[in-house]
Structure formats: structure tokens, C-alpha cells
Image (spheres, rainbow, N blue to C red):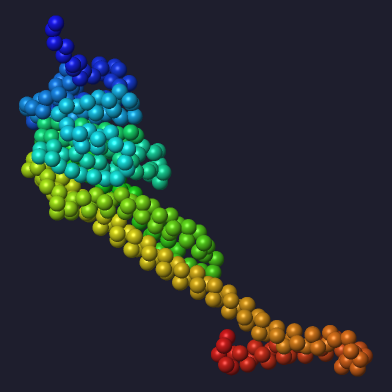
Amino acid sequence: MPDIQPPALLLPEPTTALADGLVWAVFCGAESRPTKLSPEDVASCLREPSFPADGWAWLHFDIVHTRSRTQVEAIPSLTDDAKQNLTSTEGGARLEAEDDLVYGAFPAFDDAPSEEDRDVCIWRFAMRPNLLITTRRHPVPALGAVYREIHRGKVPDNPAGLVDMALLEFADTARRTMSRLDDQLDRAEDVLLLRDHDTDLGRMSGMLGQVRRRSTELRRVIAPINRIFNDEELELPEWAEDDLRDRSERQVHSALDDLLALQDRARSLQDELTSSQAEETNRRLYLVSVGTTLMLPATFITGFFGMNTGGMFLAEHPWGTMVAGGLCFFIMFGTWVGLKVARLL
């Protein structure tokens, strides 16, 4: 009875690749543009750690598909931890290394039509010197941008360079978002510097709150990546050290510095807005207090003459109302003069 061989990991033709979750599979040579891999070459990449011998391959999977997750979990050339990382649903960033194998998860922005509506999603990867496997559950524009870049001839030397390009795309998108938030802070600062009694400080508070909320969301995403790269216990293989440890770390650290400066400025403007709102409240309370003080003598007089008792002063006088009114205004004027002399007005 002949031996039964396990079925080879063959992926479908390009016409049905999307149905099985393989979004693209390309080979990147040292001095040539990327070329599409055949299903046989894809199977060889997943089965043989030494394939391809010259250059490297990039396989990108959409793991929403069950068959795609099954294929990823059955890759024999990856460790169990790396396969678990590629199919995980956790949302945190991570970076691990085992000998020449590097795997992890990094954030990216989704494909929302407006930058204001963009949320952060996670894409995952596992790579060795001649192979990069990436997975995602939602469309990741950063990976699409990198895919177009390498087809324009900007092919990195190894998979770590491509991961670095994806991180650079994420950092650039984050900086564009921070630039838009900084423009909002400029408008808020102009309003605070040129404000008058008709300035709507409530609208300003909403604008600053939106900036602080968005900057906090970005910080919660970028800060963990910065901590990962600064982890002294992380030991990357030599072929990935320059791209990930050096260039990517500088990009992320620079973006985090810009974000922290943006948050400091937003807090400073929030403090100034709070001070302006307190000043406006005090001004209004001051006007109410002055009006109450001026009307207090008149209130006493009207209360006195409003008593229904016998022998009321000026009750029978034909000009009694005019005299009482004049007395009220005279005392109010005297009160105003007294406040001016005491420099309370």
C-alpha cells in the first residue's frame, strides 16, 4: 500500500484568491520590480524556510475568511507563537523575536473616507529574511500604500524594510492628523487673544475638548510602540535591527514627541479658556451685584411705603408718588456716588 502524502499548501488562482483570503503574493528581487507569485511558489514559501533563495516574498492575507485562517495556522515554517500572533484578535501592539523569526502587531488607520472619522486598527506580521506574511481583518490603507510604493520601484532590501515603510506611513498619517488638530488650536488661540463680550466661549470649549480627545486616542496607540522599541530585553536579529530598531524607533519617537507637544499646548489653551470663562462669569456677577446694590435703597423705600398702616407719610399728598419716586432716585444716585468714591465701580 503506497504512502499517503499530506496535501500541499496550494493557494487558489488569482481569480479566486480573494475568496480564500490571499490578497496578494509578490516576490521582491534585489534589482527588479515585484512580480506576482504563482500558487506553487506560494506553497513553497510557506513550506520551505529556504525558499525563495534569492530575494524575498510578501504574502498578505485577509483572515476574516475561515479558509485563510486555516491556511495561516497550518504554515509549517512558523512557530506556534507566530501563527497564533497572525490569527489573534487582540488589539495591542507587540514585537517578538525568535532566532531569525520576527513577529508582532502594529497599528494603522482604517479606510474611513474622512480623517476625522478614522479609527485605529491592527495589522499583524511574521517575517524571516526571505519571507514576510501579513494579516489583517479590516482594510489597512498603509499596507496598500506600501504595496504601490514597491511596484514603483522602491523595494526594500528585506521584509524589515517593508515593515519600516508601513510604520512610516502610519507616522505620516498621524502627523497629518496632528497638523489638523494644531490648526484647530491656532484658531482657538486666535479667538482667545481677540475675544470680546460676544465671543462664544462654549464653542471654544467643545473645540478644545475634541482636540484633547483625539490626541489622547493617538497617544494611547503610539506610546505602546515607543515602549516596545525602548525595551532593553527585546533582541532583534541582525538583519532586522537597522530597520526596526533604528529607523522605526526614530519615526515613532518623533511622532510621540510631536503629540506630547500638541497635548501640552491643548492643556495650556484649556487653562486659558477656563480662566477666561471664570473672568466672564465674575464680570457678569459683578454687574448683577452692582445693580442689586443700587436698587437696595429703592427696594427699602418701596417696601416701607407699601405697608398698609395708618398715618403713612405722603399718603394724602397730591404729589406723594412723585416725591417718593424722586426720593428713590436720589438715594440710588447717592449710592452710586458713594461706590465711585470708594472705587468699587
Q: Quadrant of the N terminus?
A: top left
The residue under the point 10% across, 39% down is 99
Q: Quadrant of the C terminus?
A: bottom right
Q: Position of residue 191 (x, y in %)?
A: 45, 63
Q: In the drawing, does residue 326 fall left or right of residue 282?
A: right
The residue under the point 37% across, 43% down is 119
Residue in the foreground of this view, choosing between 198 and 158: 158
* Farthest-out residue, front: 1
The residue under the point 54% across, 76% down is 282
Q: Is residue 270 above or below residue 173?
A: below
The residue under the point 65% across, 88% down is 336
Residue in the foreground of this view, choosing between 246 and 298: 246
Q: Is residue 64 visible?
A: yes
Q: Is residue 217 above or below residue 65?
A: below
* Farthest-out residue, top: 1
Q: Is residue 157 above or below residue 282?
A: above
- Residue 56 quadrant: top left
Residue in the foreground of this view, choosing between 132 and 303: 132
Q: In the drawing, does residue 311 fall left or right of residue 282?
A: right
Q: Is residue 158 visible?
A: no
Q: Position of residue 219 (x, y in %)?
A: 31, 54
- Residue 269 quadrant: bottom left
Q: Position of residue 177 (x, y in %)?
A: 34, 49
